């Protein structure tokens, strides 16, 4: 995720070129590098008012919290999912992200990127690993139980 996302310094008004239709995730990068500058702002999600508008049509894109929160640690970039959205057509979109009521806050970094098959595959692999661990535990537990009953 971190290598294929576009970083955005917040507060901002920014045009994003989204080259594919589909699902995207906005991550809050609490520890990261942008250019030569390092940012470390704490893991707690900042309170931000965010909006996304398709430039061509002027339509607002629905931004929602992720149904399954995710996190990444890639090199010096550490991020947690904050919002998700879906677009039906590629194009230029206007992202606005500010502290509520014009309030001040530290400059933080968001990363916007495609929610891809890799994340779904990773979730599937995690679920498969968890099932395998449970099956192994149950098999060993039953084997030990049989051994204990057989011993005088």
Image: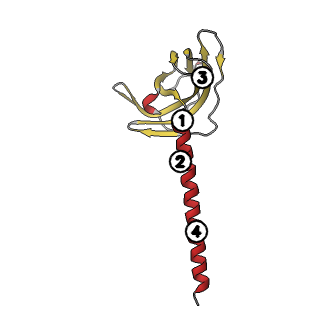
Q: Give the x, y percent position of residue 120.
A: 56, 39
- For marks 4 and 3, give the CA distance: 50 Å
Residue 106 visible from this viewpoint = no
- Give the mark, 1 or 4, whose residue is nearer the N terminus: 1
Mark 1 and mark 4: span between their CA atoms? 32 Å
Question: Tag 1, which secondary structure?
Answer: helix
Q: Which residue is mark 2?
A: 125
Residue that carries the numbered disc 4 in the rendered image: 139
In this rendering, the count of numbered labels is 4
- Side of 5 where 99 appears, left or right: right
Q: Which residue is mark 3?
A: 50
Residues marked 3 and 2 touching at CB (< 8 Å) = no
Could you tell me which secondary element the residue under label 4 belongs to? helix
Marks 3 and 2: which is nearer the front? 2
Marks 1 and 4 close (CB-CB < 8 Å): no
Q: Residue at x 59, y 25 (%)?
A: 22
* Whether residue 60 is situated above or below residue 36 in the rendered picture: above
Residue picked out by circle 1 = 117
Q: Residue at x 52, y 31 (%)?
A: 27
Badge 1 local density, few (<14 within 10 Å), some, or many (20+)? few
The residue closer to the viewer here, 70 or 19, is: 19
């Amino acid at each position: 995720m971190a290598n294929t996302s576009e970083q955005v310094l917040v507060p901002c008004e920014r045009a994003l070129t989204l080259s594919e239709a589909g699902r995207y995730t906005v991550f809050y990068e609490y520890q990261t590098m942008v250019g030569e500058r390092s940012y470390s702002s704490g893991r707690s999600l900042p309170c931000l008012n965010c909006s996304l508008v398709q430039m061509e049509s002027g339509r607002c894109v629905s931004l929602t919290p992720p149904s399954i929160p995710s996190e990444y640690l890639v090199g010096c970039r550490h991020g947690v999912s904050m919002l998700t959205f879906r677009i039906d057509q590629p194009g230029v979109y206007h992202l606005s992200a500010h502290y509520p009521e014009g309030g001040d806050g530290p400059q933080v970094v968001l990363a916007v990127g495609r929610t891809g098959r890799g994340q779904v595959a990773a979730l599937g692999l995690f679920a498969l690993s968890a099932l395998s661990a449970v099956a192994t535990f149950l098999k060993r537990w039953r084997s030990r139980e049989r051994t204990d009953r057989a011993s005088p």
